[in-house]
Amino acid sequence: MEKFKITVKLNCKAKDVFIGWLNSKTHSAFTGGAEAKMSSNEGGIFSAHNGYITGTNIEIFPHKKIIQKWRTKDFDEKDEDSIIELFFTQKEDYTLVSLSHTNIPDGQGDKYKKGWKDFYFTFMKKYYDN
């Protein structure tokens, strides 16, 4: 299994990006318009990027941290879910969003690291930096 951590700096409040992550309309908007069906409840299921990503909210710590079981259509059905942990750290005039992605099937880590940057963080910067 593979793992990695990445961080992005956003010009917004931690509360805003945290709430946006769990909101279907905002999540769709800050990932370039791909459909998202999010849940803001622990145990709630979600999908993103037109159903390519699916998962379950494991733990939610308001405005601070989200832990989710996470998988894509590229996972083999025998593969366990991977885990993402999102940390939202409010600084003086910006927010650091740190993502830890673990339990990734062997050989897929680099692809998902690039995917987070290309399909999430790049769009999130545009969305929140305006």
Image: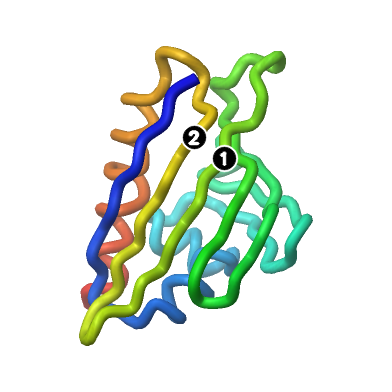
Task: Say which of 51 and 110 sits in front.
Answer: 110
The residue located at (29%, 66%) in the rendering is 96
Q: Which residue is mark 2?
A: 102
Residue 124, quarter of the rendered image: bottom left
Q: Is residue 105 above or below residue 26?
A: above
Residue 12 locus on image (x, y percent):
30, 79
Residue 127 locus on image (x, y percent):
30, 68
The residue located at (39%, 25%) in the rendering is 109
Task: Say which of 92 and 122 sits in front.
Answer: 92
Amino acid type at circle 1 is: Ile
Say which element carries label 1: strand
Amino acid type at circle 2 is: Thr
Say which element carries label 2: strand
Q: Is residue 41 above or below residue 120?
A: below
Instruction: Give the color scheme: rainbow, by chain, secondary structure or one colour.
Output: rainbow
Left or right, 80 with reference to 97: right
Q: Is residue 51 above or below residue 96?
A: above
Query: Dot 2: few (<14), some (14–19), or many (≥20) neighbours within 10 Å?
Result: some
Residue 113, quarter of the rendered image: top left
Q: Is residue 27 above or below residue 118?
A: below
The residue located at (22%, 74%) in the rendering is 129
Residue 99 locus on image (x, y percent):
40, 50
- Dots 1, 2 in contact, CB < 8 A: yes
Left or right, 96 with reference to 104: left
Query: Dot 1: few (<14), some (14–19), or many (≥20) neighbours within 10 Å?
Result: many
The disc, 1 or 2, on the residue closer to the chain's N-terminal end is: 1
Task: Say which of 20 and 6 sits in front.
Answer: 6
The label on residue 83 is: 1
Task: Say which of 107 and 39 sits in front.
Answer: 107
